[in-house]
Every structure is written in structure tokens, then in C-alpha cells.
Image: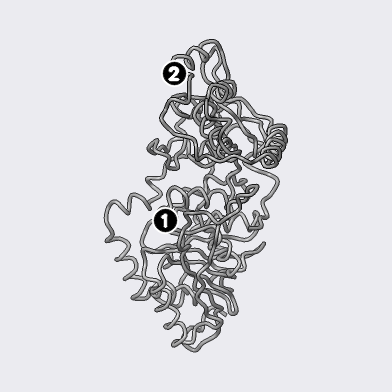
Amino acid sequence: MSTMKSEETLGGSQNPRITWEGCSVLLDINDGDRVLFARLTAGSKIKIGNKNCSLQPLIGCPFGSSFQVEVGEDGPFLSRVNRSTEDNNLGEKVDCQIMEECRDNRSIVDNNTAQSLTGEDIDDMRRKGATGDEIVEALIANSATFLKKTAFSQEKYRIKKQKKYAPRVLLRRPVTRSICEAYFKKHADKVGFLRVDTLSLLLSFANVTANSDVLVVDMLNGLITGAVAERLGGTGYVCNTYCGNTPYSINIVRMFNFSDETCKRIVHSSLAELQPSNGGTSTSIHQLEDAYNNRSQENKEILSPSTAVDLVGMEESDDGNIQTVNNLAASPKTVKSIKPGEKAPPEAIKSWKENGFSSLIIAAPELDAWSIVKELVPLLSYSAPFVIYHQYLQPLATCMHNLQTQKMAISLQITEPWLREYQVLPSRTHPHMQMSSSGGYLLSGIRIASSDNPQPK
């Protein structure tokens, strides 16, 4: 996915490639075993294994930096790893191992007697100040079967021990791709099971480009809104519309580190306000509002922005799911509040009523697709594209049939993106054993003039 992100960030003068105090980051622990979002402040901490580590060393480091948990006199801390040297050494090691590979694991018996180093010995090494890498090398040196293993088995053994005794933390920049991948991997239900390739295709079908005015129905916690705003790059508008009295939650937008200028371009307006002034609110809108307002209290709490807390205050269970770091010691002055999603200005609403939106994106799995589409498609300008995402096929098939019979759109097509992930390693390149079976479906089309929907011009 291409992005048009501005060089300015929260304060307008930050380098977006380097972290700063108060920015949001995505922390990848042990190569995806655990992912979490955090707000970097001097008082922020994360728990890795049984160790609490401060995030202070991450401030001022480039995105993509790698850190390792070490134990010093003042307790555990994150130490930056020189990845270039590490990668060079690993490449040389793998090349040598492949050349001399002539062993197999048939004679190895796993009876828990191969390792002569005990837990007490490891604790003693830690008390003496041994690093995690030194403990891993000691475990390898005291293993009676390590040299008998194949080169690939040796590498798997090394990685397993490294994750336990010297866990690594990769500092990733939260952008559309990384955020979508993280949520799809650990909390796919929160983003409607929207896969990253489906999101890329959705933005392409909707023709989201600079200076576009994009109408969005985003019930995926703000993932669609953030992706559109990132592409707009501080130009145009992304307008979230909604049924009922309360806008849908866009919590995920706060993780993008958008500049103030970009945040101003993220607005909301109710569906009733966007209807032509010469026409009353339709029965379908009232039905949608009733359906939304009659949902369970649990769903309302998830979607209502009144329950949305700041990123530094959110925290979930420590079971490998996505979570955010709780920061009780941070001063409110150190974290600048980001407030995307303000009320759309009256002049913008007037312009949209007169000229229509340049594109429409709908991701509302809890609403009937056709009921919302027939109200929103007339708000587009002629020849404007629209895209509807749904996890299941049947609602989109029904919607497509109705659009055809009422002659509201052309170039209608339903697309199911297909993605296969591969492991690419020396002599071990193959498809992943476990992959998602589906990333959802997209219904796309282009709005045309019709006697049944004459507005806007």
C-alpha cells in the first residue's frame, strides 16, 4: 500500500522515521509471538516474561530498531541490538551449515538428559551478570546432542533458547499495513476479519487519492478511517457517517501518529445531516437508526466513543493478544492529545450536498448492506466509485442484485482476494502450514445517473 504521509507529525517538526516522546509504536516481541501497541513515555513499561522493562531506551531510536532484554544492576532493561552485524554473522553461519549438512536426527532420543546445565547453574550465571546470549551459548555448549543435529535443527534450538533467555523486541512503525496485520493476527474480530490484502484492494477500488472527499461507514474501530486518512496525506476529507445519534468508535486512528493537519481532515456527520435539504429523512434511515439503537448494551459500549480511552490507558490480558501499555507515571503534559473525528464544518457539508463525494467505502458488518447502500450511493457524484466490504458473500450478492435492478451503478463486481504466505529460508521455502482461508469479500461499482436518484448533480 502506498502512502502519502506528511513529514510533519504531532508537533509539526518531528522526524516520522524516528520515535519521540509521546508517539505510538508497535512492539513485535520474539518475531510475532506477541504484539502490542504502546505510547512511548519516560514512565511506560512492558512486561516480557517475568521482567518489567522501561520503554525509555526506545525514545529517539529509528523505527525498525531491535532490542534485547538484559539484566543489569538496576534490574532488567532493553538494550539495542546491532542488527547489521547480527544479520551478517547469521548469513555466514547458515551458508557454512548448508555446505557441511550431512547429518540427520534419527539417532537422537529426547529423554531430557542431553542438557547438563541445570536451572541453578543458569540462576548463578544471571547473578554473576551473564547476558542472555551468553546463557544461550552455555546451553549449546553443554548440550550433548546439539552437534549431532542437522543445521536446521540447530538453528531452531538456538532460536527457542534465545526467545526464553534473551527475548527480542522489534520497534515497528504503526502504519496501515502493520496495524492491520497485527489486529488480523491476534484480534481479527475487532477489524471485521479484514485482511491486509483486502484492505489494499479496497483502497484501490475506491480510488482514494490526494484531495479526495471520501464518505466512510467504518464500524471496524477506525481501521478504514485511518487507512484513508493516511493515503490522503492531509488533503481532502474523510467523513465518517453513522446511523443513530452517536458516531462509531475510531480508536485505531489514534495509533497512526497523524499530524494535526491530518487529524483536522478526519470528520464525522450523521446520515440524516448529509441528506439533501429539500428531502426528508427516509424510512430506511429510521429503520437503520432503530436497528442500531436496539443493539445489545455490550455492542454499544464497544462502538461508542464515550467509552474510548486514550491509548496509554488501554490494556488487555497478557495472553499474547494485542494490548497497549499502561502508563500511570506519565505526566499529562508529556503526551499531546490527538482528537481526530471532529464534527464536519457546515461549509464542507454544504459542498458535499451540492457536488457529492468523490468515493464511498462501507465496512459495516452489523448493518444490512442494501439498506445502507441505497441511502449512501445517491450522495456520491456521478461516476464516483464505491466499495462495500463484508466478511460474508450473501449480503453483497443481494446488494449487487438490487443495484442492478434499480440501475444505480455499473461495473459491479464481487471480489474475493486470495493470499498465500510463504516461508522463504535457505533450502526451506514453502507455503505456510497455517493460513487464513478468507479475507472477506468486496462489492465495487460506479455510481450512474438515474431517474430514481437525481441528486446530487
Q: Secondary structure at mark 1?
A: loop
Which residue is depicted at the point 40% across and 68% down? 392
Q: Is residue 370 visible?
A: yes
The residue positioned 58% from the left and 45% from the top of the image is 174
Q: Residues within 10 Å of mark 2 (few under 14, many from 20)?
A: few
Pointer 2 residue: 119
**Which residue was labeled with disc 1?**
248
Three-letter code, disc 2:
Gly
Residue found farthest to the front: 107
Quarter of the image for residue 338 reads: top right
Classify mark 2: helix, strand or loop: helix
Q: Position of residue 23 (x, y in %)?
A: 58, 37
Q: Indicate which disc, 1 or 2, sits on the residue closer to the N terminus.
A: 2
Q: Foreground residue, 96 or 179?
A: 96
Q: Is residue 27 visible?
A: no
Q: Amino acid at mark 1?
A: Tyr
Q: Nearer the viewer, residue 113 or 2?
A: 113
In the image: residue 245, left or right of residue 425: left
Q: Quadrant of the N terminus?
A: bottom right
Does the residue at mark 1 contact the one at mark 2 (Cβ under 8 Å)? no
